[in-house]
């Protein structure tokens, strides 16, 4: 005991100093990492094209513009508002910088904005009929939903390889997406209202587990290879919460190849009067349910075989093998043998 006390009295201060140096070095490395991210963020913001006042410039310079396409650009504050004759808008392979007051994170892990922060993505147009969003890695779910609401005359909406991220816990708190500590948990996409759309394309789009669409005049919808989607629902209430009967809504064809829609949802769509290709959906739902039941039967059979092996053959595979007896080599016979008379 005395030796331990002497050891601590002699080496204790050195251990405290070493631990303090390690802690200060870790804090300094973290601070330098944040500074590098901040400098990189400032560089990207200085290099990005700012769309904040773009609409006002277009109104004065090109008041009769009908089609606008933005591709392969680093942009920020994307806002297209009230262009009088705009009909087609395309945003392809563009990297959108998320707004950040403190600029403490990089583009891969942005600080989630608050409710009073300006929008990163906003479209307001009463004349827009075609909207295309392709190869955009990150887009806020609430801003996308609000932008679609602000364009009631969209007839064709095309989205491919679109990464929709959950809204901020500081930005919204409602029944659909309540506040959660874990931001990686799956979320439910906000309803998308297309009162005039006839063609909808959601190919390879990450909308979370559930998608709700209001499209009374829909003719074709494509949700191929949307892996995270488990349920799609077609609403019967518009923005004014007015009920629209099925007889007043159009029939459409749906393509859901490569999706993981539940068998219940597929069967529900197959029973809907609006869906034209009901037979393919019912076959897909029954086949998916049959495949899942077959996998379950195989698992049960394997478990029964394992239990049978353990309970009815407890010694199988546990018996010790007898070692073969090795006869001694080069053993000389005893010389003390007595000769018989």
Image (cartoon, rainbow, N blue to C red):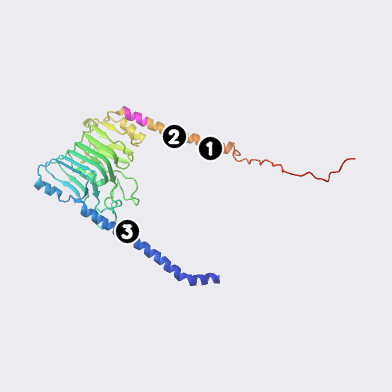
Q: Nearer the viewer, mark 2 or mark 3?
A: 3
The numbered mark, 2 or 3, whose residue comes first in the sequence reads: 3
Mark 2 burial class by Cα count in 10 Å: few <14, some 14-19, many 20+? few
Q: Please report the bounds of the magenta region as a residue range.
A: 279-286
Q: Secondary structure at mark 1?
A: helix
Mark 1 burial class by Cα count in 10 Å: few <14, some 14-19, many 20+? few
Q: Which residue is identified by label 3?
A: 33
Image position of 46 with respect to 187: above or below: below
Image position of 105 with respect to 19: above or below: above
Look at the image and tell me in which quarter the N terminus lies. Answer: bottom right
Between 106 and 276, the residue placed more toward the observer is 106
Between 180 and 7, the residue placed more toward the observer is 7
Image position of 300 with respect to 115: above or below: above
Q: Which residue is identified by label 1?
A: 306
Residue under the image location 32 percent in, 61 percent down? 32
Say the numbered circle drawn on residue 295. 2
């Amino acid at each position: 005991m005395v030796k331990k006390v002497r050891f601590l009295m002699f080496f204790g201060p050195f251990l405290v100093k070493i631990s303090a140096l390690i802690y200060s070095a870790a804090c300094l490395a973290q601070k330098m990492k944040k500074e590098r991210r901040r400098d990189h963020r400032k560089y990207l913001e200085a290099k990005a094209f700012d769309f904040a006042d773009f609409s006002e410039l277009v109104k004065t310079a090109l008041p009769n513009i009908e089609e606008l396409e933005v591709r392969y650009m680093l942009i920020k504050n994307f806002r297209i508002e009230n262009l009088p004759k705009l009909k087609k808008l395309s945003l392809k392979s563009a990297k959108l910088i998320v707004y950040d007051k403190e600029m403490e994170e990089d583009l891969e892990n942005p600080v989630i904005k608050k409710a009073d922060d300006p929008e990163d993505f906003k479209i307001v147009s009463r004349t827009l009929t075609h909207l295309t969003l392709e190869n955009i890695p990150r887009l806020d779910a609430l801003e996308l939903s609000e932008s679609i609401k602000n364009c009631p005359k969209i007839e064709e909406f095309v989205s491919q390889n679109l990464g929709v991220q959950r809204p901020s816990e500081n930005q919204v708190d409602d029944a659909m997406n309540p506040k959660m500590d874990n931001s990686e948990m799956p979320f439910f996409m906000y309803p998308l209202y297309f009162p005039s759309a006839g063609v909808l394309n959601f190919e390879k789009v990450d909308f979370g587990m559930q998608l709700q669409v209001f499209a009374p005049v829909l003719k074709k919808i494509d949700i191929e290879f949307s892996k995270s989607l488990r349920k799609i629902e077609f609403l019967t209430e518009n923005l004014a919460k007015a009920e629209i009967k099925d007889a007043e809504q159009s029939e459409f064809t749906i393509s859901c190849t490569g999706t993981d829609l539940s068998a219940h949802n597929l069967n529900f769509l197959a029973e809907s009067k609006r869906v034209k290709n009901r037979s393919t959906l019912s076959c897909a739902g029954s086949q998916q349910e049959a495949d899942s039941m077959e996998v379950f039967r195989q698992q049960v059979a394997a478990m029964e075989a394992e239990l049978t092996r353990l309970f009815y053959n407890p010694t199988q595979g546990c018996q010790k093998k007898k070692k073969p007896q090795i006869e001694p080599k080069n053993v000389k016979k005893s010389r003390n043998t007595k000769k018989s008379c």
